[in-house]
Amino acid sequence: MGAPTEGTKQNVDYGIVAIGVLSVTYNAILAFINHNIMPLTSAPVAMSEMVLLGFSFLLILKKGIYEEDLAPLGYLLLTVVLTIYVMAVNRSVYLDHLRNVLIIFAFVVLGRWTNARTLKLVFRTCCLTVLAILICEIVSVHAYVALFHPAEYFQNTRGVAPATYSDLGLFRGALGFEGRFSFGLIDHRSSSIFLEQVSLANFCGVIVIYLVSFSNRLGMFDRIALTGTAMLILATNDTRTMLIFSIVSLAGYFVYPWIPKVFDFLMMPLIILAGFVIHLLDPNKTGDNFVGRINVTVNHIMGMDLPAAIGLSLDRATTFVDSGYVYIAYGATIFGLILFWLFVALYPAGETANQRRLSHALSLFMFLNLMIGSTAIFSMKTAGILWLLVGHLKFSEGRLAMRSRGAVEPNQSTATAAE
C-alpha cells in the first residue's frame, strides 16, 4: 500500500507546500518582475508552469506510483492518446487539454501523499496571501497597480491590449461595465494576486469547497480567515456564478452527506439539460448575464457536427473559451469530454460525510462553470490546490485511510483522528 500513514505527529512536507503555494502565486510574482525588474514575454509564464509540473512529477516519482494512482494515471494516458490523435488528424500542435489533465494528475496524486497538516498550511498560506493583496487592492487600487501593473503584464505576456477607455492599469476584464452585476463596494471587479477577475472568483469557489468538505477538521483561525476571504471576494468580485455556488454550498454542507454518490454521475447531464430548458424559455437573451451565457453555450452545443465531435475541427477550439463543454469537445473530441466527466464524477470517494460533501461540491463547481463559460477551472492557479484537496480527502478518510493505517475493521468509516 503506497498511501501515507498518519500518526500522532505529522511532519509538514515543504516540497508540497512550495508547489501548492507557488501554483497560486506565480502569476503575481511574474507580474511584479515584469514591471519592477525586467519586461517579460509569454515564455517565462509557460516555463513557470512547466517547472512546477516538473517538480511535482519528480516528487511523485520519488514517492512511487502505486495501485491507488492507476485511475488518474489511466486518465492521463488516455488523454495522451487522444492528444496524439487530434494533432495527427489536424496536422497541428495542440497541447491545451493535455496540459489541463497533467495538472489534474500531478496534484491529485500529490494529494494522496499530503497529510492534513501540510494541506492546511497550503490553504492557509494561499488564503492569507490572497486576502492581504485583496485588501490592498480595495484600500488603494493605485498602490495595487504600482505593485503588479496587470494591464502591462497581460499585454507583454498574453498579447491582450489594455483598455482604451481606462488608464488605471488594471486588466481590461476587471474594469467591468455599466449594468454588470455589482454590490458597488469598489469601482471594478477585484482580482487580488491573480490580476484578473475570473481566477479570483474561482479561488473563492475553491475556498468554499474546502470549507464545505474540511471545516470540521479546521481550527477557529482557519475557519474565520477562509470564510472572511470568501465573503470579501464575493462582495467585490461581482461574480454571479460563485455567489450562487456559495449559497448552494452553504445548504449543501447539511444536505450533501445524505445524497448518494451516484448523483455526481448525473450532475453534468442534469446541468446541460437545465441549460437547454433555460434556453427554450428565453432563446433570444444575450449579453454578459447568466441566461445570456447559457444561451451562448447551448447554441454552440447545437452547432456541433460529427467532424467537430471527433476532433476534425481543432482550428476552432480556441474560439470557444467562453463555452467550456464545447471547448473540451473541439480540442479533445467528445471522448475527452466524457473522460473528464467520468473522472470528476467517479474519482472522489463517497464513503464519509466529508467525502460526499467534496464530491458533490466539486461536480457542481466544475459542470456549472463549464455551462456558463469559464475554462479557468483548468488553470493551475486554482485547479492545483483543488485537486490536491481531492487527492488528500480520498485517502485520509474511510476504508482507504484505514487500509493505509493497517486497520482491522475495513468497513468502519471515520475521519482521521490525529492531525
Image (tube, grey):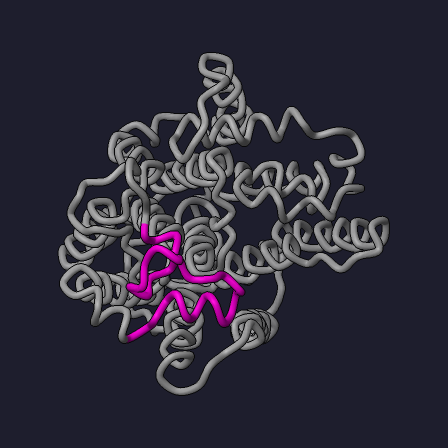
**In which quadrant of the rendered view does residue 285 lie?**
top left
**Image position of 324 with respect to 298: above or below:** below
Residue 166's spot in the image, x, y percent? 32, 58
- Looking at the image, which residue sits at the far top? 281
Residue at 24%, 45% (x, y): give it: 234
Q: Is residue 89 magenta?
A: no
- Looking at the image, which residue sits at the far bottom? 37
**In which quadrant of the rendered view does residue 361 lie?**
top left
**Image position of 29 with respect to 416: above or below:** below
Quarter occupied by the N terminus: bottom right
Residue 106's spot in the image, x, y percent? 55, 62
Residue at 41%, 45% (x, y): give it: 398
Extent of the magenta region: 147-175
Image-based side of 111 in relation to 179, left or right: right
Tell me if residue 134 can be seen: yes
Quarter occupied by the C terminus: bottom left
Residue at 42%, 56% (x, y): give it: 382
**Image position of 373 with respect to 77: above or below:** above
Tell me if residue 350 can be seen: no
Q: Is residue 163 magenta?
A: yes
**In which quadrant of the rendered view does residue 369 lie?**
top left
**Image position of 344 with respect to 19: above or below:** above
Image-based side of 336 in relation to 87, left or right: left
Q: Viewer-proximal residue, 114 or 52? A: 52
Residue 40's spot in the image, x, y percent? 49, 79
Residue at 58%, 75% (x, y): give it: 43
Q: How many labels, in total?
A: 0
Image-based side of 256 in relation to 144, left or right: right
Q: Viewer-proximal residue, 283 or 304? A: 283
